[in-house]
Amino acid sequence: MSHQDHAHPAATAHAHPPYLKVFALLVALTVVEVVVPFVLTGSRGIAATLLIVISVVKILFIARYFMHLKFDAKILGLVACAPLVCASILSFVLLWDH
């Protein structure tokens, strides 16, 4: 048997993440974030809620691909998402106060 026969099968199955596609999606979401306040001038609550949702989606994509949480153990993803959940709840509660 040659050295290649003992190669790790997971190494060949692991492809590079689609960094450019994720980057393009993040750019598109950022453009939407910039446009939303100008389009939804009359309904600040809806605009703020939409901006928070877009921000959460962007955070999840960044954590998943650029922080490589997609390839780590699931518990690390849960630990990383805990502050996100707390910040989201805080943001929505503060919207009611405004």
Image (tube, helix red, strand yellow):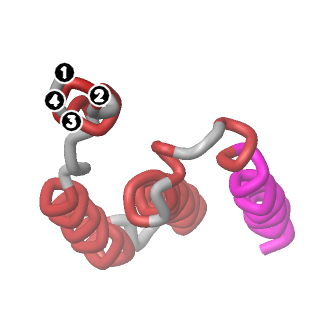
- The amino acid on which the numbered mark 2 sits, given as a three-letter code, is His
Given the image, on which type of amino acid does mark 1 rest? Met
**Residue at point 30%, 78% (across, down):** 34
**What is the CA distance from the residue labelled 1 to the residue labelled 4?**
4 Å
Answer whether labels 3 and 4 touch (C-beta < 8 Å).
yes
Distance in Å between CA atoms under marks 3 and 2: 6 Å
User: In terms of depth relative to the viewer, which is nearer, 30 or 9?
Assistant: 9
Which circle, 4 or 2, is nearer the viewer? 4
Tell me the crowding category of disc 3: few under 14, some 14 to 19, or many 20 or more residues within 10 angstroms, Cα based.
few
- Amino acid carrying mark 4 in the image: Ser
Circle 1 SS class: loop
Determine whether, in the image, residue 71 is placed left or right of residue 84: left
Q: Residue at x 19, y 64 (%)?
A: 28
Which image quarter: residue 31?
bottom left
Q: Decide which of 92, 38 is in the foreground and name it.
A: 92
Q: Which residue is mark 1?
A: 1
* Cβ–Cβ under 8 Å for marks 3 and 2: yes
Query: Mark on residue 6?
Result: 2
Looking at the image, residue 62 lies above or below residue 98: above
Q: CA distance from mark 2 to mark 1?
A: 8 Å
Q: Amino acid at mark 3?
A: His
Does residue 12 show up? yes
Circles 1 and 4, Cβ within 8 Å, touching? The answer is: yes
Mark nearer the N terminus (2 vs 1): 1
| Residue range of the region highlighted in magenta in the rendering | 78-98
**SS at circle 3:** helix
Q: For the residues marked 3 and 4, what is the alpha-carbon distance in whole angstroms?
A: 4 Å
Residue 64 falls inside the magenta stretch: no
Q: Find out whether residue 87 is within the magenta segment.
A: yes
